[in-house]
């Protein structure tokens, strides 16, 4: 029982580390703001801006579907930018991580104390590949009001 408990803790820790975000601070952070106030710019921001940090994040080990992965990384970029007081993220790109399905088969046998034994097993992994996203946490001094009808995924809390 103790070994399975330790294994479960290790799996949870690795899963949490796999979807962690990072920020390399390159400017002056400000007080944190609500992630809902952070706007994502997929082309150029509307005017001059100040760079605060370079951001990197992953979709998470158990996120399925391309749209769900994209929503996940955008929400995480917004959340990380908000922690640094940035009111915008200049999206710089994504890449797909490794993962996917695999199947393993094993068999064994032997003899112990006059008794023989045999065993077999099949292992299946259906872990999806992660999506990684990159962006710049920026501060735009006077951002224009949000355009009507511009879809912005809500931040995950």
Image (tube, rainbow, N blue to C red):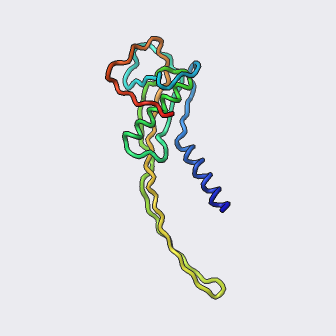
* Direction from residue 151 to residue 138 in the image, left or right: right
Foreground residue among 75 and 50: 75
Q: Quadrant of the N terminus?
A: bottom right
View extreme (bottom): residue = 114
Q: Is residue 48 above or below residue 24?
A: above
Residue at 55% across / 39% down in the picture? 20
Foreground residue among 105 and 38: 38
Residue at 42% across / 56% down in the picture? 101
View extreme (left): residue = 149
Foreground residue among 9 and 54: 9
Location of residue 156 in the rendering, given as x and y in whole percent from the top left corner: 48, 34
Location of residue 39 in the rendering, given as x and y in whole percent from the top left corner: 43, 23
Location of residue 114 in the rendering, given as x and y in whole percent from the top left corner: 64, 88
Residue at 59% across / 19% down in the picture? 31
Q: Is residue 118 above or below residue 137?
A: below
Residue at 48% across / 12% down in the picture? 141
View extreme (top): residue = 142
């Amino acid at each position: 029982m103790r070994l399975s408990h330790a294994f479960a803790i290790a799996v949870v820790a690795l899963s949490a580390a796999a979807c962690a975000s990072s920020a390399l601070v390159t400017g002056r952070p400000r007080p944190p703001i609500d992630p809902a106030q952070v706007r994502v710019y997929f082309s150029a921001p509307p005017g001059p801006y100040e760079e605060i940090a370079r951001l990197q994040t992953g979709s998470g080990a158990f996120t399925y579907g391309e749209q769900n992965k994209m929503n996940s990384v955008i929400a995480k970029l917004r959340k990380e930018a908000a922690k640094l007081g940035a009111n915008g993220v200049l999206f710089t790109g994504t890449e797909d991580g490794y993962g996917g399905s695999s199947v393993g088969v094993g068999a064994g046998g032997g003899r112990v104390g006059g008794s023989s034994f045999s065993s077999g097993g099949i292992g299946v992994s259906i872990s999806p590949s992660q999506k990684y996203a990159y962006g710049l946490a920026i501060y735009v001094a006077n951002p224009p009001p949000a355009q009507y009808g511009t879809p912005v995924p809500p931040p995950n809390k």
